Amino acid sequence: MKNSVNKKAEHANQIALLIIKAMVGVVVLILMALLGYILITGIPNVSWHFLTSPSKDFGAGGGIVNELFNSVYILIITLVISCPLALGAGIYLAEFAKPSFLTNTMRTTIEVLSSLPSIVIGLFGYLVLVIKFQFDFSIISGAFALMFVNIPLLTRNTEESLKAVSHSQREAGWALGLSKWRTILKIILPAAVPGLVTGIILSAGRIFGEAAALIFTAGQSTPVISYANWNPFSSTSFLNPMRPTETLAVHIWKLNTDGITPDATQISSGASAVLIIVILSIILLSRFLGNYLYKKMSGTK
Amino acid sequence: MNKYTLSENYLTEITDPIAIETKHLNVFYGKKQATFDANLKFPKHKITALIGASGSGKSTFLRSLNRLNDEIATVTGEIKYQDIDINRKNINVYEVRRQIGMVFQHPNPFAKSIYENIAFALRQNGMTDNLDQRVEKSLKDAALWDEVKDKLTTSALSLSGGQQQRLCIARAIAVQPDILLMDEPTSALDPISSRKIETTMQELKKNYTIIIVTHNMQQAARASDLTAFFHLGHVIEYNRTKKLFTTPKMPATEDYISGHFG
Amino acid sequence: MNKMQQRLLHPSKATRQDRFGKTISLICIGFIMILTVSIIGFIAIHGLATFFENHVSVMQFIFSSNWNPGQLGKNGQPQVGAFAMIVASFAVTLLAAILATPFAIAVALYMTELAPKRGAKMLQPVIELLVGIPSVVYGFIGLVVIVPAIRSVFGGTGFGILAGSIVLFVMILPTITSLTIDSLQQVPDHYRKASLALGATKWQTIYKVILRAALPGILTAIVFGMARAFGEALAVQMVIGNAALTPTSLTSPTATLTSQLTSQMGDTIMGTLPNNALWSLALVLLIMSVIFNLLIKVVGKRGEMKK
Ligand SMILES: Nc1ncnc2c1ncn2[C@@H]1O[C@H](COP(=O)(O)OP(=O)(O)OP(=O)(O)O)[C@@H](O)[C@H]1O
Ligand SMILES: [Mg+2]
C-alpha cells in the first residue's frame, strides 16, 4: 500500500518536473524566436545608406540617421537632468532618512511615480511642458518626460547601491571626524560606483527604447536639420534642443500606425534590429563595466 | 547570571591627570538600557582595558565616548573632556571624533590604495604638509611600514586581515588624535599579528591615551595599566590591572577572570 | 578658554557640510515629490472636467459603451461611454497575466529549485533580454507576425484582444518571473530540507511547501505584471484594432484605455469635450495604477505578517 503511494508520488513528481522543464524550454524558444526574427528579417535592411540618410514620409528608401541621432541626444539630455536628482534623492533615502511617516511617504511617492504608465507621463508632459510652458514638441519636453520615467528607477538603484556599501565604511569616515556629507561624497559614493554605473547604463537602455512618453512631448517628426550647424540656438541645428524630434522607437511606432510609407515594414524591421542591437550592447556594456569597476575597486585586479 | 549584585561596585581612585571621564553615563537603545550609570576616569598616557562578557555593554560604552552612538542610541549623563561636557547637544561632534580616534573590531580600510587610506585621512583634516613623511611615520608607528613600503599604491583591500587592522591603526593615529579608542582590535587576528599590535600600543601610549575593549584576558593583563570590568551594562570593578587580576574585590570579577563566570 | 575648547564648542566646516548635504538631497527628493503630486493633480483636474464642466454622469462614463464624444446622441446627451475601453483593458491584462503566470513560475522554479546554478546562469540573460526589448518592437512583431497568424487561424482582421494579450504576455513575463524568483529565494532553506527529509518528492515539496510559503510574493509579482500590462500603450495600440467598440470576441477589433489615448489625443482640441473625455480615460489609468500599488502593498503586508 505504502509502496504504491510512493510510486504514484514519484510518478507525479516526474511528470511535474518534466512539464516545468518544457515550459522553460518554451520561454527560451520564444526569446530565441523573437531575437532571431528581429535580427534575421531586420539586418538585411540595414545598410550604410540606411544608417546615414534621413527618413522619408511618403516615398520608399528612407533611412534613420536623424532618428538615431535624436535618440542618442535625447538620452544624453535625459541622463544629465535625471542623474543629479536621482542621486540626491537616493542619497537622502539611504543616508539621511530616519524611519518616519515622512520617509514612508517619500518612498510611496517614488513607487507611485514608477508605476505610472509612461503614456500618462507623456500626456502630463504634453499638458504642462508642451502647452502650458510652451516648450512645444521639443527635445527638451521629451527629455523632461523621460526624466520622470527614469527617476524612480535611478533613485532606487542609487539607494540600493549606497546601502550595499558596508556600514563600517561610514563609521571609518565618521571616526576620523569627517562630516556625514564628506563621508558620503568621498567614501561611500566612490565605493558604490560599480552599482551606480551599472544602474545608470541599464536605465539608458530602457530610455533608449521608450516611445510612449515621447509621442506627445518630443513629437513625431524631425524638421530638416543640418549636422554642420553647431549653433544650438539656430533652428536648423542638429543640436537645437527646442526642435521637435522623432526618436528611433517613435519612428517604428509611427511607421506602423500611419501607413503612408510604402516600405514601412522593411524600414521598421531594420530600425528594430538597430534598436535591439544598441540595447543589447548597452546591457552588455553595463555588465562588463560593472564587473570591471568592481574588480578594480576590490583590489582583485 | 543574576546572582551578582549590580548595585555595588568597586572603583579605584585615580590620582593621575585625567584625559576623559564619564559621569552617570546611561545609554538606551530605544527602551532597552545598555549602559547603567557608568562613572569612569581614564588617565592620560595610560592604556585602559574594558573587559566583560559578550553583550555586557563594552562597545556601547566605548562608542559613546566619541559620540558614534548618536545615530542609534540615546546617551544621557556627562562625558568630560578638556573640562567640557562633550555629551551636550551643541557640541561639535566632528571635532570630538577628530580628537578621539577609533579603531574598530573588524578592520575597515577604505577601498583605496594603502597610501591613499592614510593620505586621505590627513587631507580631510587639513594636514597636507609633508604628506609622504606623515604617511610613512604613521605606518611605522603602526608597525606596518616594512611590510607595505614597496606596494603603497596597491589596494588596501589586498592586505591580510592583520595588516588591514594595522593600516586602520595607522590611519587613526595619522591625524594625531588625543585619545585612541580600540574595540577588540585584535579579535579577528592571528596571535602574531595581535602581538605586533600590542607592541604598537606600548609605543603609542607615550603620546596617546588608549582605551581598549578586549575579550582576551591575557592581553588585558599584559598590555593594560588599568582594567574596568563590565557586567550587564554595569561597571562592576575598576582598578589597576595588576590588582584587578590578582586581588579582585568583587565576586563577579573574580568569577569572570577565573573562568567560573555565570 | 583654550583653543581646543573653542573648537569643541563651535560649529566648523563639517557642520556646514552636513547641513548643506542634507538640504541639497532633501531638495532633490522634495522636488520629485512635488512633480509626482503635480502629475496626479493635473491629470485629475483635466480628467474630472468631463464630469464637472460637461456634466457627463460617472455612471454613463463607466457603464455606457457609446463612445463618440464629438457628437450628441439621440437623447441630446454627449456620448462618453468608456465601458468598451475599460473592458478591453481589463481583458488584455487578465489574459496576459493568466498566460504569463504559469510560465513565469516555471522559469522561476527552474532557476531556484531545479537547477539553481546552471539554470540561473542560463536564464538570467534570457530574462534581462526580454526586459530590454522595447515595447514598440514587441508591437511591431505583434503586427507582422501575431496578427496575420490570428487572421489565418480565426479569420477576421486578426486585430483584437487575443493579439494584445499575446504581446503583453511576453512583455510581462520577465517582470513576473524576476519578482517570483525573489520571493522563492526568500523561502528559508530549512523548509525544503524538512520536507525532503519527510520523504516528500521534489514536486510535493515545491507544491505543498515552497509555493505556499512564497504565495504572497508570487501574488505581488502577478499584480506588478498586471500593472505593467494595464499601462502599456504602444505595443497594444499597434495590435488591438483601435475601434472603440465593445469586444464581441477575442479577435474583434477594439480599443483599450491606453490605445484610445494614444491614437486620439493628437486629434482633439484642448478644452473641448472630446479632449476632456480622453483625460478622463487617463484618469482611469492613473486611478488603476494607484490601486495596483495599494494592492501590492496589501498583499506584501499579508505576506510579512505570516512570516
Ligand atoms: N544597535 C543596537 N540596537 C539595539 N541594541 C543593541 C545595539 N547594539 C548593542 N545592543 C545591545 O546592547 C547590549 C550591549 O551590547 P554591546 O555591543 O555594547 O556589548 P559588548 O560588550 O560590546 O559585546 P561583545 O563583546 O559581544 O562585543 C547588548 O544587549 C546588545 O544586544
Ligand atoms: Mg562589542
Image: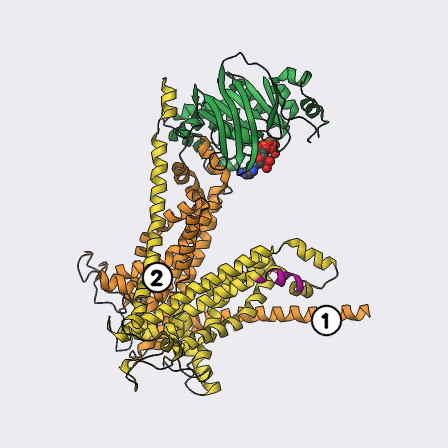
Around disc 2, counting alpha carbons within 10 Å, would you say few (fewer than 14), some (14 to 19), or many (20 or more)? Answer: many
Residue B175: give x, y in percent of width and height: 43, 25
Point out the image quarter for the C terminus of chain B. top right
Callouts 1 and 2 on one subunit: no
**What subunit carries mark 1?**
A
Q: Magenta part of the protein: which range?
A: C208-215
The tint chain C carries is yellow
Residue B163: give x, y in percent of width and height: 54, 31
Which lettered chain is shown in orange? Answer: A
Residue A252 appears in view: no
Under circle 1, the secondary element is helix
Residue A142: give x, y in percent of width and height: 29, 62
Q: Are marks 1 and 2 in contact (CB under 8 Å)?
A: no
- Give the residue number, with chain letter if any, for mark 1: A11
Q: Is residue B242 above or below residue A256?
A: above
Under circle 2, the secondary element is helix
Q: Gap between marks 1 and 2, in whole Å?
A: 54 Å
**What subunit carries mark 2?**
C
- Give the residue number, with chain letter if any, for mark 2: C40
The tint chain B carries is green
Residue B6 appears in view: yes
Q: Amino acid at mark 1?
A: His
**Ligand 1 lies in which image quarter?**
top right
Name the residue at 53% across, 32% down: B27
Residue B47: give x, y in percent of width and height: 55, 19
Left-right relation of B139 to C85: right
Q: Is residue C120 above or below residue C64?
A: above
